[in-house]
Image (cartoon, rainbow, N blue to C red):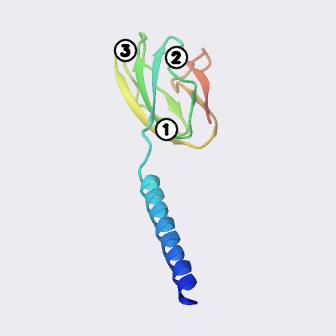
Amino acid sequence: MKRTPLIAVLATLVLAVLAVGASVAAGSSKSTSSPAATRVTVAASEFKFVLSKKIVPAGAVTFVVTNKGHTTHDFKIKGKKTPFLSPGKSATLKVVFPKGKFPYLCTIPGHAAAGMKGVLTVR
């Protein structure tokens, strides 16, 4: 009679360990998959940038920058920048962000002062 409660306790313990193991395994498979990068389109022209999103979640962001103006422009954020873009040309820039505020600008002399600058908010 003393064995029955012991067997029941052991069986419950084994089931609990198996359940914890299964949920840990399920959680680890989710953490290895990376979320898709946020996509932000950037239209550059004289003398402004128009971003499709000015607030993005922390993580990878893909900027698709298109020069819709009549002079050469580029786009710089968090130490990364596109090449100089002739009118009508595009470039893609991938940047990983922590939470915070990140200034962006055109590095061609005089362009940022003329308005080609802003701040991206990462939450």
Location of mark 3 (residue): 87
Kind of residue at disc 1: Lys
Q: Quadrant of residue 2?
A: bottom right
Q: Residue at x 49, y 63 (%)?
A: 24
Picture quarter with the N terminus: bottom right
Local crowd size for mark 2, using a 10 Å CA cut-off: few (<14), some (14–19), many (≥20): some
Distance CA(mark 3)–CA(mark 1): 21 Å
- Mark 3 vs 2, N-terminal side: 2
Which residue has dot 2 on it? 50
Q: Farthest residue toward the bottom?
A: 2
Q: Residue at x 40, y 20 (%)?
A: 66
Residue flagged by tag 2: what amino acid is it? Val
Name the element at disc 2: strand
Q: Contact, CB < 8 Å: mark 1 with mark 2?
A: no
**Which image quadrant: the C terminus?**
top right
Q: Quadrant of residue 122?
A: top right
Query: Which residue appears farthest toward the left when viewing the image?
Result: 89
Residue 35 percent coordinates (x, y)? 44, 43
Gap in angstroms between the C-alphas marked 3 and 2: 16 Å
Instruction: Look at mark 1 in the image and give the residue it sits on.
Output: 80
* Structural crowding at the residue carrying mark 1, measured as other residues with C-alpha within 10 Å and reported as few (<14), some (14–19) or many (≥20): few
The local secondary structure at tag 3 comes to loop
Q: Give the SS element for disc 1.
A: strand
The three-letter amino acid code for the residue at tag 3 is: Pro
Closest to the observer, 4 or 36? 4
Q: Nearer the viewer, residue 117 or 43?
A: 43
Relative height, residue 58 to residue 82 (above, below): below
Q: Residue at x 54, y 89 (%)?
A: 3
Q: Are marks 3 and 2 in contact (CB under 8 Å)?
A: no
Q: Earlier in the sequence, mark 1 or mark 2?
A: 2
Residue 30 in the image: x percent, y percent?
A: 44, 52
